[in-house]
Amino acid sequence: MSTYMPKAQDLTRKWYLIDAADKTLGAVAVQAAILLRGKHKPTFAPHADCGDNVVIINASKIILTGKKLEQKKYYHHTGYIGHLKEVSYSKLMAEKPEFAVTKAVKGMLPDNTIGRKSLTRLRVYRDAAHKQESQKPEEWKF
């Protein structure tokens, strides 16, 4: 019996909807990363990009447990000497909750071309309204 190898022309990408309201940031990011990679499919292969499209709604209603909202920081460097910027997650979740969710999902994907390509299939929205109604995404329960 030979090993099944998924081919690009044989793939069918489904659309999934994740409602992040009253769920933790890590739990939502884990489920989104699993769907984006395609690890929920029986035809998963680590060398192939066989994942699905994911829409995350209600990113502003996501929960960070413990004292993460005050103590956790997002760091980025501008490229200039000494210009390391930090933003607390309380400010980040108030202003750009979509970015915080995207960053969490990106950290759970591999750092290669498959991970970068998978991240392009992620859409995150602040509230319940989204632009993917015509794709008829099915709700993902976890």
Image (cartoon, rainbow, N blue to C red):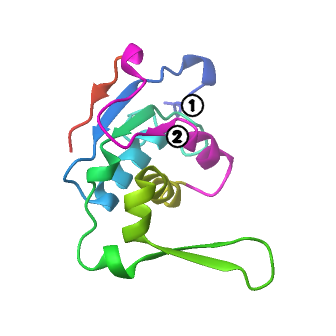
In the rendered view of the protein, which quadrant contains the C terminus? top left
Look at the picture and state if 13 lies above or below 87: above
Could you tell which of marks 2 and 1 lies nearer the N-terminus? 1
Q: Is residue 38 visible?
A: no
Q: Was residue 114 drawn as part of the magenta stretch in this picture? A: yes
Question: What amino acid is labelled 2 in the image?
Answer: Ala
Q: Which residues are magenta?
A: 110-135
- Identify the image quadrant of residue 104: bottom left
Q: Which residue is mark 2?
A: 45
In the image, 44 versus 139, the foreground residue is 139
Pair 2/1: label in front:
2
Question: What amino acid is labelled 1 in the image?
Answer: Met
Position of residue 58 measured from the top left corner of the image (x, y, whole percent): 30, 43
Q: Residue at x 73, y 70 (%)?
A: 78
Query: Is 46 displayed left or right of 83 in the figure?
Result: left
Badge 1 crowding class, 10 Å Cα cut-off, few under 14, some 14 to 19, many 20 or more, is few
Q: Secondary structure at mark 2?
A: loop
Do labels 2 and 1 touch, CB within 8 Å? yes
Look at the picture and state if 85 lies above or below 56: below
Position of residue 51 measured from the top left corner of the image (x, y, whole percent): 49, 35
Checking the image for residue 102, the label placed there is: none
Checking the image for residue 5, the label placed there is: 1
- Identify the image quadrant of residue 89: bottom left
Position of residue 93 measured from the top left corner of the image (x, y, whole percent): 38, 61
Position of residue 55 measured from the top left corner of the image (x, y, whole percent): 39, 35
Q: Residue at x 63, y 47 (%)?
A: 116
In the image, 89 versus 27, the foreground residue is 89
Q: Is residue 78 visible?
A: yes
